[in-house]
Image (spheres, helix red, strand yellow):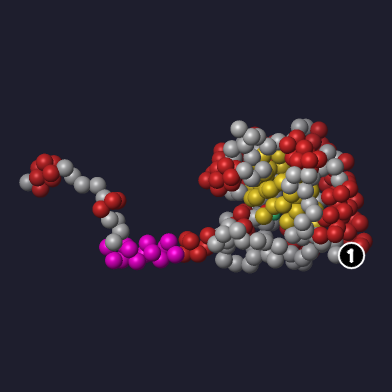
Amino acid sequence: ARTVTVRTLANMKRAGEKIAMLTAYDYPTAKLLSEAGVHVLLVGDSLGMVVQGQPTTVPVTLDQMVYHASLVSRGAEGAMVVADLPFLTYQVSAEEAMRSAGRLMQEGGVHGVKLEGGREIAQTVRRLVDAGIPVMGHIGLTPQSVHAFGGFAVQGKTADRALEMMEDAVALEEAGAFSIVLEAVPAEVAAEITRRLTIPTIGIGAGPHCDGQVLVFHDFIGYTSGYIPKHNKRYADLASVIRDAARQYIEEVSQGVFPGEEQTVHLQDAELRLFQS
Ligand code: KIV
Ligand code: NA
């Protein structure tokens, strides 16, 4: 079967083939998405928001990431699996970053890790890469810094900030990252970073010129009832499917229509007579 690796992704960029990445947080989703041919499954710390119902990704722990990574790894058939290093599990020291990444790979079974930040994190990226850990960068709107930004706003909207973002991207590539996520950055900035880098860029709210795209699974499939970011496109309306199914189930239970004959098991006549006698 087709197996996606860091080399596959590098070759895809060279060939001009776009990379399709989606987040996944559990086994059945990983199985379905990888069977459909999604190249990379990201166990994103967005699970804090879409699975746990928290307001940001900041409360997500390494133990939780390891747990979800293990579920996704078990279902990913041929897709590359990358997991986020959660807030403050990689900034304190390169040693701590390596132990955190090690847990995601050994216990979580992932093929690479993603961390947020640019030049300030490049040394750590180098240490991880030197230890044989594939690293995906993430710049632009880095949600773990939401409290420092003062909200989830598009980044790099001035020429100065766009140039800094370019420097961050180049530093991550030089540090050995195999790919970089660009989140919520103007399309022109993402296009220029994509042209400049040899490694593939994966955009989310970063326009059409990135080497690949990523969406958050729950937003993508319409399995969310709260705030949906502007960059999202709903490819299905799972919320309606679930709501309608639940209403029909309630109706059938209350009417005595469910369970019907098809869902029911009976005693054989002889056993029934013995049972009733
Ligand atoms: O956690 C996540 O889902 C992410 C993607 C939005 C890139 O980091
Ligand atoms: Na994330």
Instruction: Classify residue 100 as left or right of residue 122.
Output: left
Residue type for callout 1: Thr
7 relative to 227, above or below:
above
Residue farthest toward the left in the current orientation of the protein: 277
Instruction: Classify residue 58 as left or right of residue 156.
Output: left
Q: Nearer the viewer, residue 25 or 21?
A: 21
| Residue 221: quadrant of the picture | bottom right
Q: Position of residue 23 (x, y in %)?
A: 64, 50
Q: Nearer the viewer, residue 29 or 85?
A: 29
Mark 1 burial class by Cα count in 10 Å: few <14, some 14-19, many 20+: few
Which image quadrant: the N terminus? Answer: top right
Which residue is drawn at the image coordinates 55% and 62% (left, top)?
237
Q: Position of residue 33 (x, y in %)?
A: 59, 46
Which residue is drawn at the image coordinates 86% and 58% (left, top)?
189
- Looking at the rendered structure, the number of numbered marks drawn on it comes to 1
Q: Position of residue 110 (x, y in %)?
A: 65, 38
The magenta stretch is: 244-256
Does the beta carbon at disc 1 come under 8 Å from ligand 1?
Answer: no
Would residue 158 be counted in the magenta stretch? no
Query: Which residue position is annotated with label 1?
Result: 158
| Residue 96: quadrant of the picture | top right
157 relative to 91, above or below:
below
Q: Nearer the viewer, residue 188 or 105?
A: 188
Q: Secondary structure at mark 1?
A: loop
Q: Is residue 88 visible?
A: no
189 relative to 19, above or below:
below
Q: Is residue 234 visible?
A: yes
Instruction: Classify residue 51 as left or right of residue 21.
Output: left
What is the chief secondary structure element of the magenta stretch?
A: helix
Which residue is drawn at the image coordinates 75% and 35% (left, top)?
7
Q: Position of residue 233 (x, y in %)?
A: 65, 61
